[in-house]
Amino acid sequence: MRKPFVAGNWKMNTDIHSGVELARSIAAGSSDIACHSVDVAVIPPFVYIPAVVQALSSTCVAVGAQDVYCEQKGAFTGEISPPMLKDVGCHYALCGHSERRHVIGEKDGLINKKVAAAVSGGLLPIFCVGELLEERQASQTEKVVSRQIKKGLANLAAEKVSAVTVAYEPVWAIGTGLTATPQQAQEVHSFIRDLLAKMYDRRLADDIRILYGGSVKPDNAAELMAQNDIDGLLVGGASLKADDFLAIIRAAV
Ligand code: PEP
């Protein structure tokens, strides 16, 4: 039985005051269901992580990072390592978010190292995959997602992969207001689960959580969550409004 998981990616938004307020409102509004019925995480910009961790310290809402570097320490100017994130109270780290892939230019090989380093460093990676609009239009979705999954998880043993949450985020649906239909999302989630069963085994594939992301809103969350292989939601824009994010969390239970 996979427990639902809802994570809010704040991207490069909020300031310290509004971030702490947003975190507090989310914790207060979800206190009756977070932990036992649904896992909830917020993913603020790096610099606000310590303040948000402190604001959430006696709550059931966890904190994640939007990225993580693949080395533990050393001459990597500007990067943040898994031990640094653990040190400030982070539990999760996004790896391979589409904005890192397509705006910053991260490739599958680097993302693979980040996923491996995150797990070795005791973080829980949220490993993002998804196709571009032109790839979907060319019927390349399965080919692209399969390449991203195989390369992104290359050389990771099954026990490491079981620490991973996969997020399917079609790039054409992120921040655009276009959402995959529940059927489109389900098809890809089921494809990913079958692929993981082939790469590892059926038990691992049945246990791993696969989140959907891409313009999730309070009015489409329940229908997405009703699909067999959608285990949770990765939410961008709507996670910046406490009421919207709380409605999405409730729809996931
Ligand atoms: C995201 O940033 O992962 C995301 C899904 O964004 P949005 O919900 O705004 O499309």
Image (cartoon, helix red, strand yellow):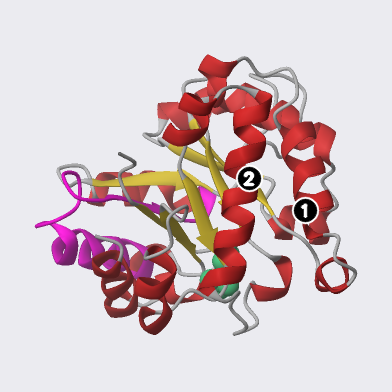
The answer to the question of whether label 1 and label 2 lie on touching residues, with beta carbons closer than 8 A, is: no
Nearest the viewer among 40 and 4 is 4
Please name the residue shown 45% across and 42% down the image: 209
Nearest the viewer among 212 and 67 is 212
Look at the image and tell me in which quarter the N terminus lies.
top left
Confirm if mark 2 falls within 8 A of ligand 1.
no
Ligand 1: which quarter?
bottom right
Residue 97 x/y as whole percent? 66, 53
The residues colored magenta run 18-46
Label 2 packing within 10 angstroms: few (<14), some (14-19), many (20+): many
Reading the image, the residue beneath label 1 is 142
Q: CA distance from mark 1 to mark 2?
A: 9 Å
Compared across the picture, whether 40 is left or right of 71 comes to left
**Residue 111 image-quadrant placement:** top right
Please name the residue shown 47% across and 52% down the image: 229
**Residue 222 image-quadrant placement:** bottom left
Label 1 packing within 10 angstroms: few (<14), some (14-19), many (20+): some
Residue 79 x/y as whole percent? 69, 36
Q: Within the magenta stretch, is there residue 146?
A: no
Helix, strand, or loop for circle 2? helix
| Residue 154 visible somewhere in the drawing | yes
Residue 227 x/y as whole percent? 43, 62
Q: Which three-letter amino acid code belongs to the residue tagged 2?
A: Ile
Compared across the picture, whether 253 is left or right of 126 comes to left
Q: Within the magenta stretch, is there residue 37?
A: yes
Please name the residue shown 60% across and 30% down the image: 197
Q: Which mark is residue 192?
A: 2
